[in-house]
Image: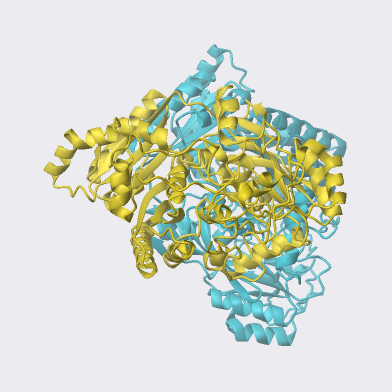
Chain colours: A cyan, B yellow
Amino acid sequence: MSENRTRRVGPASVKQQKWWGWGAEGIQFSFADKPKFAPFVMDVIGVDVTKPAPRVAELSSFDIPSTQLSEALRAALNDAIGEEYVVDDDEYRVIHAFGRGVRDLVRVRRGQFGRLPDAVVYPGSEADVVAIVNAAVDHDAVVIPYGGGSNIVGALEAVPTETRQVISIDMGRMNKVLEIGDASSLARIEAGVLGPDMEIQLNAKGWTMGHFPDSFVWSTLGGWIATRSTGMQSDKYGDIADITRGLRMVMDGQVLVLRPLPSSSSGPSVREMVLGSEGRLGIITEAWVNVHRLPPVREIQAYFFPNYDAGLQAMQWITESDAAPSITRVMDANETQFSMANGKKSSRVSHLMTRAIQEVMTRKGWDLNAIALGFVGYEGTAVHVRYEKSLVSKIVSRAGGMSVGKGPGVLYDQKKYDIPYIRDFLLDRGIPADVSETATPWGLLKQIHDTTVAAATAAMETAGVQGFIMCHLSHSYHSGACQYFTFAINDSSEHNMESYDLVKRAIQQSFMDNGGTISHHHGVGEEHSPWLDQDISPAGVFIQRKLFEGVDPDQRFNPGKIIHSGLPGVSSNSVQPE
Amino acid sequence: MSENRTRRVGPASVKQQKWWGWGAEGIQFSFADKPKFAPFVMDVIGVDVTKPAPRVAELSSFDIPSTQLSEALRAALNDAIGEEYVVDDDEYRVIHAFGRGVRDLVRVRRGQFGRLPDAVVYPGSEADVVAIVNAAVDHDAVVIPYGGGSNIVGALEAVPTETRQVISIDMGRMNKVLEIGDASSLARIEAGVLGPDMEIQLNAKGWTMGHFPDSFVWSTLGGWIATRSTGMQSDKYGDIADITRGLRMVMDGQVLVLRPLPSSSSGPSVREMVLGSEGRLGIITEAWVNVHRLPPVREIQAYFFPNYDAGLQAMQWITESDAAPSITRVMDANETQFSMANGKKSSRVSHLMTRAIQEVMTRKGWDLNAIALGFVGYEGTAVHVRYEKSLVSKIVSRAGGMSVGKGPGVLYDQKKYDIPYIRDFLLDRGIPADVSETATPWGLLKQIHDTTVAAATAAMETAGVQGFIMCHLSHSYHSGACQYFTFAINDSSEHNMESYDLVKRAIQQSFMDNGGTISHHHGVGEEHSPWLDQDISPAGVFIQRKLFEGVDPDQRFNPGKIIHSGLPGVSSNSVQPE
């Protein structure tokens, strides 16, 4: 039975996602203007999306485990930051119990809440965070930092067997750009700021951080740092690990202060230990980050290649060339087809494809089912953009591809944050869809792509479900690149998470078997922990464990993430049939 | 009394520096063809370098502490890697007891040997390193990895009070490029290879790693990784932390294996924990590194600026521009004067300065004592080099500077590894000279430069010695740069290390007080450890200590480096008067 305590809502200034899905209430994917979408989904996974989806249950229809917050800890938290910022309302506890991975959403929609936090607290300053941590230490509670809630690897939930009180620290009030160091192209920014709110503040002064992950709208600076995030324009602006130059982190009894430095040789990098620590070392409160003047010209150019291999080859050649574009992206045949099926009636992608371009392709003898769509982004002065475009244009031709202008790039720019909404649209119909990404050296790119697609397909066959997997190269580096896989399986049964696990695990194991990392930019959390010893070797896991044990001997800071106590194991938060 | 045991020399294939100075026997600095050098030194520090220097004492004239190698450990090491690779010859023990910092050289020339290693061992493979570590564990010995011996922060010496047996592991036999992954622009290289030997192997296949630290000739890949090294062309090729994509490290009972990955989000970066670990976590045996095709065109262009400020401004503008040169370097007035005084009679620097350029400067109203010489390096196709040069040329003009062609750049290229020889030339005359470098945000560059010069000058006055300090900007990053200070003091007394300490400490403290890091690329070792809590905050030192204690609870791997047991403290290896 749900015990409804005095209902308190979170501070109005803190944006909140739906408890049952991605994004704010009222925003969802629609295929109304996309005539090819429904036929495409029917074709590749056999699902009729034109049928209305069943309604998600009311939260109040579920038994929600009561808060276990003691009166003593409640009083201490109230003292620490003020009563209005200590919330134990059921809906807020549910929202803060999970990220927005497909497993999270399936569980929460089924009312399988696991170990909910006992309170959600909203610090407004680093001093507040210190006071919260002190209260947690005094009352033997566990603290879990919460940014935008977009995590998809199970990094936000308490250990299911946790017997101590659990406090979710929602950083949303700490959302300000505190300082822009014009003389140094650095900005000091509070950790809880969501992507758009941060860019608005920076843009107003003529600056940008240039960090645009797919989760941009619902993820925060602190979350990016804690998970080693990467953005769509990281080829130019660097991963968050490059962007973050200094930071502050609240620990038990002390505050880590790393001043902004362009580079340093002060022993093993503490900065790089905090990056990717997923809350296990402390609560990041603010960071000094590289910022850049808004570029005079920004352009995304689209290219078609006869096949994915040609596209990969072009992207590698671009990386080896004197050009340094902001985006290098190319889709395999499946994702190219998906992208065209996802085009609006009025979109130039479909427009271009039905007229001149398609004729050229046919004349060239291209297999229209094998073609690969690519995007390259350019930034700088007009002269520079022209120069780089000419370098890339020659490379694309050498790889057998052709330019199709700026139109599709504009479209890409508009739709870049849509994927989670499509994921939820399918989930509304019971269909699990998810993403997995990995980085490998260039020489292994083709192999890991083909092997992973084959492994996922075999797993779908084993599960006896129709499914679809597509992939794009999303980021290029000197010696390799990231490939980003998206898959969906037609299993809306109550056992569909078993099918999902078969496919997801086959993909992750393929990453391990083919020279990839377990995750390029989503982190480890609960979901990827079982593969960590294959990724960084048992000795690497040993080193991480010694770091966590030494710094947080009481396992008070987001325990159980990255490294389980019993590695190698499997995710402890399995989903039950309904 | 020196007890001369059976003399064994190291393997012929392993190059060895002099026991008393930088580089191989027979190579030294000469000012024979540099007419302005001696007058310049007389002018700035009042030392007459035309007088012959006293001879360095024979090593055999000193009492050399005997090896404490037990017969049991000797037998275990012999079994492990073969008798010919286990050396306890006095000279080799002395050579391996120190890096080549000024304090090291003063001590060794005075016969103050401290805690010499009891044996020097030369593994030929990772299996050999494992066998050595196993023997050390079995016999409770300490292991210290040794690359080229170029360390200048006291990272190679045993703790003075060490009671356990000490083994120096000279990695010099592990000097091969094992594999070049042409398809991925990666190479797998043994950790013990010296810079030139590595580049020769890479160049033969058309590749370069692009890492050229000042120590290049006498430093190794493993040493660069262990100290977070940076090279002269790191603006383009990245610091060693960027270049190193994977590695293997032998630990107690296990081997860390990090596969080559362009990027990853597998928790706190273990790769970045090994980088800068100075031997405290284990022995690095090999690494996967980024390699690049040798560029078609490579050019270094020289520029004069009316003063250092204008030069700094130009370098920052270059970093903000669309240009991405391989080298950005500008010298302050003192270093510009030194550079011109160090020119050969036939050199173009002096040539250009005495003719056309000097006239132009005078016409522009420049103060010839304030001018700043800068270098910018370009690499790529001829078209690209031309394009970037035109971008930079406009910036230099905007900053009030002027181009002086390629001549001085060629000269810079030839002399870039000379500084340690000049340091030893002065030390032969009793004059301590040393370097300190720091990175700061751009906005603090001028302040930290001026304050550091003032602090060093005040310290020289306090010490009552004439001295000289000069500086150049050596590396540029998006949000800041490294400034590299060189200083010399006219104190050849037996107490000159006290004067030296006053100056060196004033410089390091100025770095801390003005937003700099304790070292941009020389590491921490013994020398910089006392400032570490000011650099990365006490919480940062706490995190590093917990890492070291957790991973190496027996303090077997190069103990005492980076973090002393009693921080904050002072260097435990003080120099005594003769």
Please identify the quarter of the rendering in which residue A113 is found. bottom right
Instruction: Identify the residue at horizontal 85%, vertical 47% (top origin).
Output: A498
Please identify the quarter of the rendering in which residue A95 is found. bottom right
Tell me the quarter of the image containing the C terminus of chain A: bottom right
Can the viewer see residue A264 in this picture?
A: yes
Pick whichever, B418 or A284, lies toward us. B418
* Residue B340, position as x, y percentages in the image: 29, 41
Q: Is residue B90 left or right of residue A539?
A: left
* Residue B470, position as x, y percentages in the image: 35, 53
- Note whether B99 is above or below B448 in the view shown: above
- Note whether B106 is above or below A251 in the view shown: above
Can the viewer see residue A431 in this picture?
A: no
Tell me the quarter of the image containing the N terminus of chain A: bottom right
Pick whichever, B175 or A168, lies toward us. B175
Please identify the quarter of the rendering in which residue B44 is found. bottom left
* Residue A408, position as x, y percentages in the image: 49, 34
Q: Is residue A505 left or right of residue B404?
A: right
* Residue B378, position as x, y percentages in the image: 39, 33
Instruction: Identify the residue at horizontal 83%, vertical 60% (top origin).
Output: A565
